[in-house]
Image (spheres, rainbow, N blue to C red):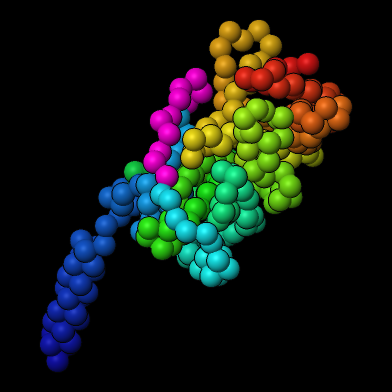
């Protein structure tokens, strides 16, 4: 009898090992999962992402359409363009006029935790302190397709930090008094304080909308011989604001101890 019970236990144990082995083989581990971008893939039109500073993107063809009706805006469902199931949140939605005609464009500011897999795992020390990524999306109505489509994204992989909701008046406006007008898009993010600091790190990224897409604006730090993408960081606050009332906004970066002002010279920001 004891021999029969022992044999039964051995058979059951063997079956359990076999089942676990099959399950392990059928479920790919983290190293086999493909890398996933920050923004999900949508059944939308061509998407434009920024090119490095100093390069120009060709102007995309525009789809002509009839005058908009309120129905066009009722069709807009911003959450359809946010990966809510992956932990993303819609920080803010703004209707802005980027091309001077109706219908307006929709600007979505999005934040979410990064998707980490074996193919794109970063060392923990390299992750932003908040482990949060953010980005901007511009949606435009395509009259030919009869739907809203993603027209531009700030970055396919997301940018470090938690996005802050900015006033609608700060988005899509000719804040640099350019002629022809150059609508400016802003992504302002913050990360938690670093060791030894009580202040968050604020980062402001600036983009200019031209020829149906957006590119990073330029900056040239003191002593530099080439332009860089306009990315400003400070320990306390960074904002684009017209401090001298000349209709051309400046970037004010406050470290809590020192304040740096960046002036737009018509082509780039330079420290004043």
Q: In the figure, 73 relative to 34: above or below?
A: below
Q: What residue is rendered at 57% in x and 16% in y? A: 227
**Residue 107 percent location from the top left of the image:** 58, 51
**Dominant secondary structure of the magenta stretch?**
loop
Q: In the figure, 129 relative to 240: above or below?
A: below
The residue positioned farthest toward the bottom in the image shown: 1
Q: In the figure, 187 relative to 232: above or below?
A: below
Q: What residue is rendered at 58% in x and 59% in y? A: 89
**Residue 90 percent location from the top left of the image:** 59, 59
Lateral position of residue 257 relative to residue 175, left or right = right
Q: What residue is rendered at 72% in x and 44% in y? A: 170
Total labels: the figure holds 0
Lateral position of residue 270 relative to residue 52, left or right = right
Query: Range of the magenta residues?
Result: 52-62
- The residue closer to the viewer here, 259 or 126, is 259
Quadrant where the C terminus sits is: top right
Is any part of residue 126 visible from this angle?
Answer: no
* Picture quadrant of residue 233: top right
Q: What residue is rendered at 16% in x and 73% in y? A: 14
**Residue 160 percent location from the top left of the image:** 57, 41
- The residue closer to the viewer here, 52 or 129, is 52
Is any part of residue 227 visible from this angle?
Answer: yes
């Amino acid at each position: 009898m004891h021999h029969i019970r022992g044999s039964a236990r051995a058979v059951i144990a063997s079956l359990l090992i076999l089942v676990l082995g099959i399950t392990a083989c059928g479920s790919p581990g983290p190293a086999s999962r493909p890398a996933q971008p920050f923004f999900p893939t949508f059944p939308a039109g061509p998407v434009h992402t920024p090119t490095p500073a100093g390069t120009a993107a060709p102007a995309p063809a525009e789809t002509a359409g009839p005058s908009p009706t309120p129905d066009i805006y009722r069709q807009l469902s911003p959450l359809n363009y946010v990966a809510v199931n992956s932990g993303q949140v819609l920080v803010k939605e703004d209707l802005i006029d980027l091309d001077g005609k109706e219908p307006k464009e929709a600007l979505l500011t999005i934040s979410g935790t990064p998707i980490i897999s074996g193919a794109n795992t970063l060392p923990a020390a390299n992750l932003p302190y908040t482990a949060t990524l953010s980005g901007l999306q511009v949606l435009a109505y395509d009259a030919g397709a009869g739907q809203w489509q993603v027209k531009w994204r700030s970055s396919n992989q997301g940018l470090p930090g938690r996005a802050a909701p900015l006033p609608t008046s700060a988005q899509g406006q000719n804040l640099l008094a350019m002629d022809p007008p150059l609508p400016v898009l802003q992504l302002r993010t913050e990360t938690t304080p670093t060791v030894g600091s009580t202040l968050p790190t604020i980062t402001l990224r600036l983009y200019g909308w031209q020829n149906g897409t957006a590119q990073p604006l330029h900056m040239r730090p003191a002593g530099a011989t080439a332009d860089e993408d306009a990315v400003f960081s400070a320990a306390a606050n960074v904002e684009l604001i017209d401090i001298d009332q000349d209709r051309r906004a400046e970037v004010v970066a406050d470290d809590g101890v020192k304040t740096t002002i960046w002036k737009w010279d018509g082509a780039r920001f330079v420290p004043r």
